[in-house]
Image (cartoon, rainbow, N blue to C red):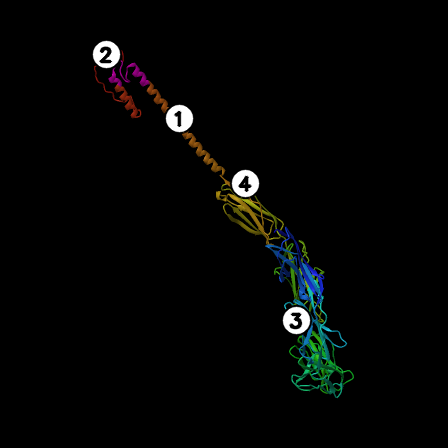
Amino acid sequence: QVFTFNTVEILVQPSAKVKNGAPMSIVCHADISKSTNFQLEHNFTIFKDGKIVFTTVSDKGDAQYEISMARSSDTGDYECTVEADGKTKSSNSLHVWVTGMTKPILTAEKKEVLEGEVVKLRCELPEEPPPLYFFFRKIKMNSTPKEKHIFEPYRNFSVMEFSVEEGDNILQFDCFGRRNVKLEFESSEHSNKTLVTVREPFIKPTLMARPSSNVTEGDRIQFECSTVVARMRDIEIILQKNKTILKSVREQKLLKHSAVATLEHSGEYLCKVEQGRASKTTKLNVVVSELFPKPILVASMSTLDENKELTLNCSISGFRRANFAILRKNSNGDIFLRNARNLTMRVNVNDTGSYICKAEVKGIIKESKPVKINVYAPVSKPTLTVVSGLPEVVLGKPLWLICHSVMGTPPITFTFYKGDEVKKIVTNDTYATFLDENIGQNDERGYKCEARNNHSRGMETSNILNVTVIVPIKNATLGSIHLGEVEDGSNTAFVCSVNGGSWPIHFRIFRKTDRETLVFEKSEYANKIIWHKETMKKQDTGTYYCMASNRANVAVKSHPITISVILATWQKGIIAAFVLILIVGAVALAFWWFLRKKKKGNEDSALATNLTSGKMPGQHNDGDYYSGSGYIEDSENHMKSTDESKGPDLESAEVEYTEVEVSALDPHR
């Protein structure tokens, strides 16, 4: 009994897209080949979105999963698996879409509410699996419905609240649902409409102004705001003007507020009644007519010198019967000057400020616009100085100048001059600065500054400031009259020179051996310096260089030169004479030694001749001849002793004679 699965298929009847509530069948079909016609049991399993929804065992090649009423929850991916005698095969996945959603059910917590309360609604989509979107609508007569929505990922119902506002009488609510299927949105039909009746907790308030909403300055005006309420608890009445609360009362039906009318009381007033979330308002426009115009303050002059007279006059156009006062404005409170229409005073700089006048009629006080008065003290003679202190500047560097006037009422206008040319105009309090970046080497123009303010005396001019331009030093050079070698004990001179630079110049000469030593320094109003060095010594040998600097604070260094101290001529002569004496002495000694050797050689030659002829020196010819070894030995001893005594005088030596018996000569010896 051999078999094999050819295919396993899954089908949906009537189609893969089914309307909500219609019947639907999921069919799993297995195509199997057998070696013989034998009975084979099949285990059918149907999955929806990976979960088992149907299983059956059949000896047939088909299995059917019946759904009598398809719902949205039946939407998903279906797959079937067939197992027989240890062999298993699965079908491809098939997406089934149940279109349409069940009608939602809407319920309201209350059927009757008060203004300011909330309506709590519950919308449910039975038999619809989450996630779902819920949409709630509040419907009023002759207005666009207000809509709110909420997403519910884990349940098939949702709750929403709507506030009941002023003017809401009869309200209708409904809801609908929406879901996302394969990146497409599908909406349900709208739920049943739920009717909610609204009752007023209080009536719209009434706002009145007594005696009238049109009054004149100085009249007393009274505002009254009232309402009718169902219950007094938590009721509040508020009176406002331009969003400013003037008065409020709680748990009362009537609010009263009175004041003396001024022009500032003109405008729109609002009465608001609140209870919980409910709120109702009423508006009233009030017009206050002017009793008299604002006073006008006039000054004899707005800018004047100190110790001058100032007159202030206060008046009301077309109105004379008023009480006047003149004051000076101050941050800590206005300073009273005089209860009068006019004021005359002699001013000083401390009187600078803003002045006003006030007028009072029937308890109404009005204030004029402020008048600015400026009192000026004359400027003092300014001083012009260099910011760095000294009246000098290095060529190529900027020059900062400051002009300062100790006295004078600001603002002060400062004018800077270079020669007769205006360079800068600055307005400041007590000083001003000027930067000159264009300074030449031969720039001899002086600087000055002028200061002036609004005082009638005019300007003051500083003294002329002459600034010295310091030219930096360039290219230092060191030279010597003895280049290279100097005799010991002789004098020499070093010359350090520079190429340009402002005087005085500070010169320094250094000697460098194993360390650097400052050997000479001097400041000179010249471009060079000469150092006369007397009696050069061996320790003065070394490398020399010079450095030069001036007030520009830039030091330049020369190239080094090498000086060697050698022996003087007379020292060389003494050494040569000493060497010559040594040589002559050595030659004389050698010659003496040669003569002595030569003399000694002659004496040795004469002695040898005598020995050969058988005669002794000093022996007479008429004596007997002595021969034999005894004589020879004696002669040898005698010569030996003579050598050891280093040449004694042979003629003065005393010779002893001895008679010996001589045998016949051996002819063979």
Marks 4 and 1 sit apart, C-alpha to C-alpha, by: 45 Å
Query: Which residue in the structure is indicated by mark 2?
Result: 664
Type of residue at label 2? Ala
Q: Is residue 154 above or below residue 549?
A: below
User: Seen in the image, is 658 located left or right of residue 351?
Assistant: left
Q: Earlier in the sequence, mark 2 or mark 1?
A: 1
Q: Nearer the viewer, residue 656 or 361?
A: 361
Q: Is residue 489 above or below residue 426?
A: above
Query: Which residue in the structure is indicated by mark 1?
Result: 591
Nearer the observer, disc 1 or disc 3?
3
Marks 4 and 2 sit apart, C-alpha to C-alpha, by: 92 Å
Q: Report helix, strand or loop for mark 3.
A: strand
Q: Residue at x 47, y 35 (%)?
A: 573
Type of residue at label 1? Phe
Type of residue at label 4? Gly
Query: Which residue in the structure is indicated by mark 3?
Result: 157
Q: Report helix, strand or loop for mark 2.
A: loop
Q: Earlier in the sequence, mark 1 or mark 3?
A: 3
Query: Which residue in the structure is indicated by mark 4?
Result: 484
Quarter of the rendering containing residue 381: bottom right
Type of residue at label 3? Phe
Q: Report helix, strand or loop for mark 1.
A: helix
Marks 3 and 4 sit apart, C-alpha to C-alpha, by: 113 Å
Count neighbours of disc 1 (C-alpha within 10 A) and say few if under 14, some if 14 to 19, many if 20 or more: few
Q: Is residue 657 above or below residue 2?
A: above
Marks 2 and 1 sit apart, C-alpha to C-alpha, by: 50 Å
